[in-house]
Image: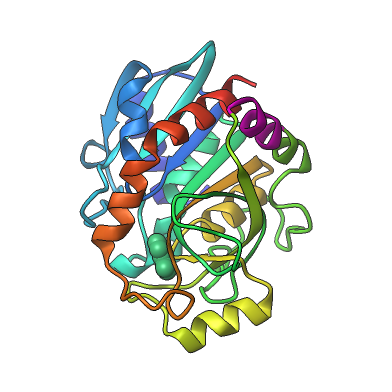
Amino acid sequence: MEKKLQTCLASIREKTDFKPEVALILGSGLGDYADGIQIETTVDYTEIEGFPVSTVTGHKGRFVFGNVGDVPVVIMQGRVHYYEGYPMSDVVLPTRLMGLLGAKKLLLTNAAGGINENFRPGDFMMLTDHIATGVPSPLIGPNLDDLGPRFPDMSEVYSHRIQDVIRNAASECEIDLKEGVYVQLTGPNYETPAEVRMCKIWGGDAVGMSTACEAMAARHMGMEIGGISCITNLAAGISKEKLDHKEVQETADRVSKDFKRLVTKIIET
Ligand code: HPA
């Protein structure tokens, strides 16, 4: 196993022997979900030797270990983004760690700009697939053979079984769930209208700066994945408005109650 991964894993294992079943990564503005669960223990990223620490506002940096219903979960409250300047191997290190801690399933969440004309700010979009050609693959470099194969299959990144779970959970929560393809670009700048048109021609429904890389690393290790975007704004050119991180935060705040209900229902199922 990669040295850094080994060091981080040992560092966490010194602090807790908690064995999660589900891993959850919280996106921009959705971070306070972790405060509401039955917390067993937390580990700040700064306490983990060699761990990449995030800088963007609105992202707390810690692992929260606890239970949602009777499901043991590990939550990444605040993720690491490629645009912060970390190599991709660091960006996906926390995801790999959660897998190594025992999580077999991963629920990825993010804030994203809506490309699909049927989407409105505040909508939730379940990821049916992604396009990650706008960022380098996190699997570039020597293959981590003990995690997975050199050329991993990506034909079902977002598990059809979990997609059904998410659809049913949304329906039980009476949430009008949208579905679509997520495009990851590097950021940190928002897209130009021409780039958004390109994403649309590619087949994208939403655009953001995270998630697909983590999904690739998780799929590489055989984790079963689900994904949800909070459409915090319409992407550049789809709306005439200029984009502002404040709007992203405000929309995420506005829908955070529904988000919590939905995520809890998904995990409990
Ligand atoms: N583009 C990219 N990332 C985003 C957006 C967007 O419009 N909204 C929230 N994250």
Is residue 267 left or right of 50 when viewed as pictured?
right
- State the image coordinates of residue 202 (x, y, percent, origin top left): 67, 78
Q: Where, by quadrant of the figure, is residue 7 drawn?
A: top left
Residue drawn 31% across the image and 34% down it = 32
Name of the residue lying farthest toward the bottom = 194
Magenta region, residue range: 165-173
Residue 24 sits inside the magenta stretch:
no
- State the image coordinates of residue 59 (x, y, percent, origin top left): 27, 47
Residue drawn 64% across the image and 46% down it = 221
- State the image coordinates of residue 20 (x, y, percent, origin top left): 51, 23
Relative to 1, say whether 140 is above or below: below
Relative to 9, say whether 245 is above or below: below
- The prevailing secondary structure element of the residues shown in magenta is helix
- In-front residue for pair 242/91: 242
- State the image coordinates of residue 38 (x, y, percent, origin top left): 37, 14
Residue drawn 23% across the image and 57% down it = 56
Residue 166 sits inside the magenta stretch:
yes
Indicate how the structure is coloured in the image: rainbow
- In-front residue for pair 30/221: 30
Q: Confirm whether residue 15 shows in the render.
A: no
Q: Where, by quadrant of the figure, is residue 234 drawn?
A: bottom left
